[in-house]
């Protein structure tokens, strides 16, 4: 487990003192019996959301709630959200969310929604994934992609992740876990494509992140009135998942 260090107003995670973490081993599965209830996200639509959804994503070919079983963790290898978006526009690439770093004004406030969840973003290349994820659609068709702004090897992994970035990444996973009934795999880009990719990098605190997800420790306490209303609205033939899906008024799952 990594240690936290302070720089300015943001809390950061330093590199492990017991040796470098190996991002091509980053992978854990989500236990079905620990699935959270509805988890809101502090997200805003990026100005490029519409363009990226139209031009850098495709149909999943199946219902989004049936197809998603994987969430892939990436890092931008750049200095800002803008750099990632510019790269995506130049190449055939995208992801569903970007988590800004501490040098961006959005840091500490919200994450960017970049591509509609109903669409398959272009965030993983043509890789042999069956031995890791099992048989099924290709990775993009079955997954969500999250990018953390971090310079990675551009600065020889000397750019630490902030605690807020790790917390928001855990919240995204919990949000998706609550929303998509088949979500199971949380995995690094490096694990899926070790010959070409190393993100989120050896400086990413994977075990800290995993603990935050599995313990739900980054979630806010729900207001008692929300819990009371949810309990009173349940019927014998309607479960909480159906309510969460039906009542979800968010923009991210629209085509």
Image (spheres, helix red, strand yellow):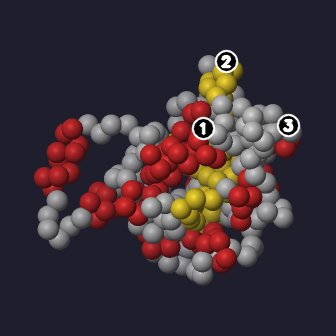
Q: Could you say which disc has been placed on residue 8 in the image?
A: 2
To which residue does mark 3 refer?
Answer: 155
Q: Could you say which disc has been placed on residue 17 in the image?
A: none
Nearer-N-terminus badge (2/1): 2
Nearer-N-terminus badge (2/3): 2
Q: Residue furthest top?
A: 8
Residue 112 image point, x, y percent? 57, 44
Q: Residues within 10 Å of mark 2 (few under 14, many from 20)?
A: few
Asked whether the residues under the numbered discs 2 and 3 touch, taking CB atoms below 8 Å apart as contact, a structural biologist would say no
To which residue does mark 1 refer?
Answer: 165
Residue 225 image point, x, y percent? 19, 39
Residue 235 makes an appearance in the image: yes
Q: Is residue 251 left or right of residue 61?
A: left
Residue 192 image point, x, y percent? 71, 65
- Name which residue lies at 29% across and 65% down: 242
Residue 132 quadrant: bottom right
Q: Is residue 210 left or right of residue 103?
A: left
Nearer-N-terminus badge (3/1): 3
Q: Residues within 10 Å of mark 1 (few under 14, many from 20)?
A: many
Residue 222 image point, x, y percent? 30, 39
Question: Is 12 placed above or below 141 here?
Answer: above
Q: Secondary structure at mark 1?
A: helix
Q: Secondary structure at mark 3?
A: helix
Residue 170 makes an appearance in the image: no
Out of 243 and 164, give the one closest to the viewer.
164
Question: Is 208 placed above or below 87 here?
Answer: above
Q: Residues within 10 Å of mark 3 (few under 14, many from 20)?
A: few
- Count of labels shown? 3
Question: Is 14 placed above or below 40 here?
Answer: above
- Name which residue lies at 67% across and 76% down: 131
């Amino acid at each position: 487990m990594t240690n936290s260090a302070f720089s300015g107003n943001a809390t950061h995670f330093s590199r492990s003192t017991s040796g470098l973490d190996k991002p091509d081993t980053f992978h854990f599965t989500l236990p079905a019996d620990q699935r959270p209830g509805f988890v809101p996200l502090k997200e805003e639509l990026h100005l490029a959301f519409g363009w990226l959804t139209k031009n850098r994503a495709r149909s999943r070919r199946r219902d989004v709630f049936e197809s998603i079983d994987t969430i892939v963790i990436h890092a931008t290898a750049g200095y800002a959200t803008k750099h990632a978006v510019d790269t995506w526009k130049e190449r055939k690439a995208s992801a569903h969310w970007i988590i800004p770093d501490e040098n961006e004004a959005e840091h500490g406030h919200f994450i960017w929604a970049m591509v509609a969840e109903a669409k398959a973003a272009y965030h993983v290349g043509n890789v042999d994934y069956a031995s890791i994820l099992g048989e099924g659609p290709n990775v993009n068709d079955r997954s969500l992609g999250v990018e953390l702004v971090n310079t990675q090897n551009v600065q020889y992994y000397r750019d630490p992740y902030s605690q807020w970035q790790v917390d928001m990444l855990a919240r995204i996973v919990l949000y998706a876990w609550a929303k998509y009934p088949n979500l199971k795999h949380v995995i690094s880009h490096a694990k899926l494509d070790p010959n070409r990719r190393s993100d989120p990098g050896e400086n990413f605190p994977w075990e800290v992140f995993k603990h935050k997800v599995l313990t739900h420790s980054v979630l806010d306490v729900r207001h008692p009135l929300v819990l009371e209303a949810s309990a009173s609205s349940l019927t014998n033939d309607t479960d909480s998942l159906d309510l969460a899906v039906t009542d979800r008024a968010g923009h991210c799952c629209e085509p």
